[in-house]
Amino acid sequence: MKRGLILWLPLALILMLFAVFWVGLHRQENHDIASQMVGKPLPLFTAPAALPGQPGAATADFRDGKPRLLNVFASWCVPCVAEVPVLMRLKAMGVEVVGIAVHDTAPALDQFLARNGNPYARIGSDDQSRIQLALGSSGVPETFVIDGQGRIVKQHIGVVGEGDVPELLAALGQKP
């Protein structure tokens, strides 16, 4: 009897390990890295214009009493394409969206905006990711709600979708 039990023990251990790995793979956990800058003033920056004819962005632009969105994006970012229609809708609702283009070129940005639309009032160039890192942004796309005094009120990691609009509008102090 003991010999039969010993023969089944390796199979039982393998099945148990398989079950542990299966549960671990299918557990939904949030792996987003939240910015430590939420609730703090926007870091000082001046981003030159990423495109001719459209102004760049600077910290001072966010201290005029008007809340707005700061969207960190890139023309090479596939998920960034998905959020443009929602950003365009927010723009049509009167929300000012300022873009920070990370590791991008003017020709690539021109093509991106021509294909997808341009929701941005300003687009600053961040070739070295210095602004992105100062914001505590861990990737693109990422959107920050900035109050009229230049303080980061909210961070949205990932694509801005239709379901995010009411929450962003509320953070901006607007009615959905």
Image (spheres, helix red, strand yellow):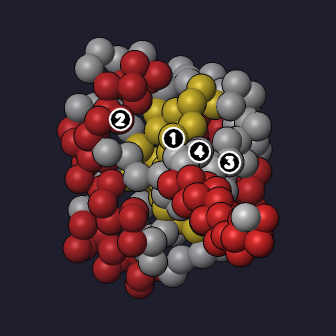
Q: Mark 2, mark 3: which one is toward the viewer?
A: 3
**Is label 2 in a helix, a strand or a loop?**
helix
Mark carried by residue 156? 1
- What residue is pinned by disc 2? 164
Compared to residue 12, the image places residue 26 above or below, namely above
Other residues around mark 3 within 10 Å, as few (<14) / some (14–19) / many (≥20): few
Front residue (pair 158, 19) = 19
Q: How far across and how far down the image is residue 115, in percent?
A: 23, 73
* Residue type, numbered disc 3: Ile
Work out how far the residue at label 3 is from the one at label 1, CA to CA, in angstroms.
11 Å
Residue shown at the point (60%, 65%) measured from the top left: 15
Mark 1 residue element: strand
Question: Which is more foreground, mark 3 or mark 4?
Answer: 4
Viewer-proximal residue among 97 and 86? 86
- CA distance for labels 4 and 1: 13 Å
**Contact? badges 4 and 1 (CB < 8 Å):** no
> Does 68 sit above or below residue 127?
above
Give the mark nearest the N terminus, 3 or 1. 3
| Left/right of residue 154 with respect to residue 93 in the rendered view | right
- Disc on the earlier residue, 2 or 1: 1
Residue under pointer 3:
33
